[in-house]
Image: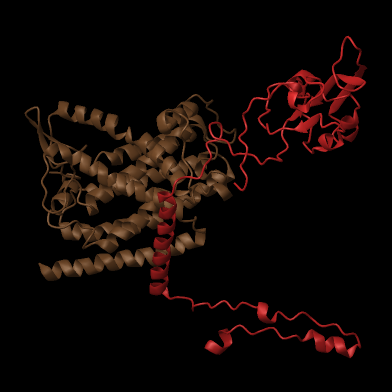
Amino acid sequence: MPDSSQPTTPQPAASAAASATGLTVTAWSPGEDVIEVQRTPAPGAARGTWRTFRETVRGLMTTFGRFRETPVTVQYPEEKTPVYPRFRGRHKLHRFEDSDGVGSGLEKCVGCSLCAAACPADCIRVVAAENTPENRVSAGERYAAVYEINLSRCIFCGYCEIACPFDAITMGHDYEMSDYDRSDLIFTKEMLLAEPLERTPLRNEGE
Amino acid sequence: MTTPLAVVGYYEPWWIQIIKAIVIFAVGLQLVPVVLLAERKLLGRFQSRYGPNRVGPYGALQPLADILKLLTKEQFRPSTSIGFLFAVAPIISILTAVAAFAIIPFGNVQHIFGTRVGLYGIDVSIGPLYVFAFGGVAFYGIMLGGWSSGSKYSFLGAMRGAAQLISYEVSQGLALVGVIFTAQTLSLTGIVEAQKGMWYIVPQFFGFLIFLTASFAETNRAPFDLTEADAELVGGYNTEYGGGRFASYYFAEYLNVLVVSGIVTTVFLGGWLLPFGIHPPGWVDPIIVLFKMSLITFLFIWVRATLPRLRYDQLMSFGWKVLLPLATLNALVTAILVVATH
């Protein structure tokens, strides 16, 4: 009986019931959104076997198509997925460069501890000290005598670089920071100032 | 006078038999790691990834690393297990697989060192029956392993294995009956010789398909790997096995794949025969057989990469309601045709 097997379109019966109470509640009618799935009748033994066989062969051809493709695996330690320019990796501390014109070689960090205040993970420790004419480390009045970031606690949110008034700390692109010891994950000022190993490829524009 | 159980086609001198046993052991069993690696590499390629490629060149030493890892592991067994059976079950599995490997013919009788040597373990007059006999015993390896583990997952896996092997062995046997009718012999070398005109894959195409499908079930491979069914049974009958014993099961599984490939090659793909009447020198025969076996093994891996596992009731209804009637029909039609044409 083909008539009974046809799916019937749902009728908006609820709207009639709602108008009786005086409220204008219109039930959502699926209308155009209904997709009718045309089902073939359940096959008999012979046709079912043939259909199974056919579909099996189709599946085999699909996997064979994959077999002929080049694998998409990135061979990680040798090749790396390039990161986006705004990727937030390991922090970097900066010095004034020659191109900045003034105070070349001096640290940008003035030890204000705003980064430590902004840090939600409380992983930055700054101990400031006064610059003296004999020992001038930064461009401001004070400098960071101790600057430590505990990378085992850092959540790489980037609030420190937003908080920093002198762009002294920025997030780099380095994400290979695993270590065997937790104490090795506390990065000191010297480590953060040092030029990081160029281990992470940068993604080009539109790549 | 007692009737012999089976007639052996041709006896070599005893020392040839020993050398043959060693050669089959040395060459034949080295195929298992190759299949193991091929499976992992091919499965990778079917899924658009590289398989193992870290150990050795192109990952070629991966099976060696796997086996070394397994063999250096601690032998343990659950406190609920039955010790003796637990230890014996993997041995039964591997023994039957190796025994079945003995009758796969890799070539015709050759003249080597002045003696006639058949390039097979033994040529018996009950070839397919021998395979089925050892296939039947192999079921004890799974059954006892699952039973003696004292674990519900192992037990369920073994129970499934028992039902599955019994169901599909019938169809497997019946699928071969058509070939035996046509070839008029039960000797595997005889069956190959009978395919001189045309390989049996052409006249017995349905038999080939039925045999292949039943063989997937017999070797407990996808889509019929319900005995192992990792998702629902943890690991099936070998859940509680580790180390060398697990390696034995693993080894037996892949050896069974090789045995089935060998049987399909011999029975349906003309063994060492080449089409179009090409007659290569005798030493090429094993290479031809190995090539055809590798094609069937590729098909096994291909199917594993494609088809999802059947549900248990689907497995049973497919075995008894589809495969068995088809196999019976195939045997019946072949019998009628053979009688009509003789």
The picture quadrant where one finds residue A29 is bottom right
Looking at the image, which is closer to me, B266 or B44? Answer: B44
Q: Position of residue B136 (x, y in %)?
A: 36, 47
Residue at image point 19% right, 56% down: B199
Residue projecting furthest to the left? B114
Looking at the image, which is closer to me, A80 or B264? Answer: A80
Residue at image point 28% right, 61% down: B207
Q: Is residue B315 left or right of residue A171?
A: left
Q: Position of residue B266 (x, y in %)?
A: 23, 49
**Chain for colour red:** A
Q: Is residue B90 left or right of residue A154?
A: left
Q: Position of residue A192 (x, y in %)?
A: 75, 23
The answer to whether residue B224 is visible is no
The picture quadrant where one finds residue B306 is bottom left
Residue projecting furthest to the front? A101
**Chain for colour brown:** B
Q: Position of residue B175 (x, y in %)?
A: 29, 59
Vertical comparison of B140 with A89: above or below:
below
